Image (spheres, helix red, strand yellow):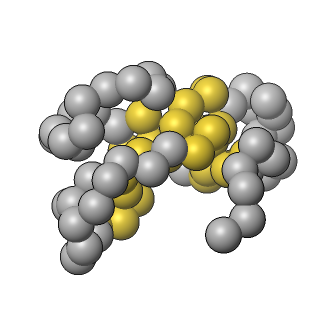
């Protein structure tokens, strides 16, 4: 996928979360605990809970992430 901001190629990955953080990572099935160096931390969580996963494309050049939620159900 081309980045809509800089038109460079984006990397396919996933948004994941644990009790401490939300991160973008290249691999879908990694340990539930996000460790330093596993990916790009996007936010800190103040809640406990299960790992959630969404498809996301990351542009390392301009530091943007595009989330694809076309396969997710409404809650």
Above or below: residue 2 compared with residue 51: above
Is residue 70 at least partly visible in the picture? yes
Report the number of discs.
Answer: 0
Task: Answer with the quarter of the image where residue 39 lies.
Answer: top left
In the shown orientation, is residue 51 left or right of residue 26?
left
Query: Where residue 17 appears, x then y in whole percent?
Result: 35, 52
Above or below: residue 59 compared with residue 26: below
Query: Where residue 51 appears, x then y in whole percent?
Result: 36, 48
Q: Of 4 and 67, which appears nearest the observer?
A: 67
In the shown orientation, is residue 19 left or right of residue 2?
left
Write the residue at 45% across / 50% down: 52
Instruction: Give the quadrant of the N terminus.
Output: top right
Write the residue at 61% across / 50% down: 65
In the shown orientation, is residue 29 left or right of residue 12?
left
Instruction: Give the quadrant of the C terminus.
Output: bottom right
Above or below: residue 28 compared with residue 15: above
In the shown orientation, is residue 41 left or right of residue 13?
left
Please identify the residue farthest to the bottom as the structure is shown.
46
Query: Where residue 61 appears, x then y in whole percent?
Result: 58, 39
Write the residue at 55% across / 31% down: 13
Q: Of 45 and 75, which appears nearest the observer?
A: 75
Is residue 21 at least partly visible in the picture? no
Task: Answer with the quarter of the image where residue 31 lies.
Answer: top left
Write the residue at 32% across / 26% down: 30
């Amino acid at each position: 996928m081309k980045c809509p901001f800089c038109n460079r190629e984006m990397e396919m990955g996933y948004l994941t979360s644990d009790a401490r953080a939300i991160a973008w990572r290249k691999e879908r099935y990694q340990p539930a605990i996000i460790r330093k160096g596993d990916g790009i931390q996007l936010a800190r969580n103040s809640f406990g809970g299960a790992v959630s996963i969404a498809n996301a494309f990351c542009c390392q050049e301009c530091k943007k992430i595009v989330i694809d939620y076309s396969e997710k159900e409404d809650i």
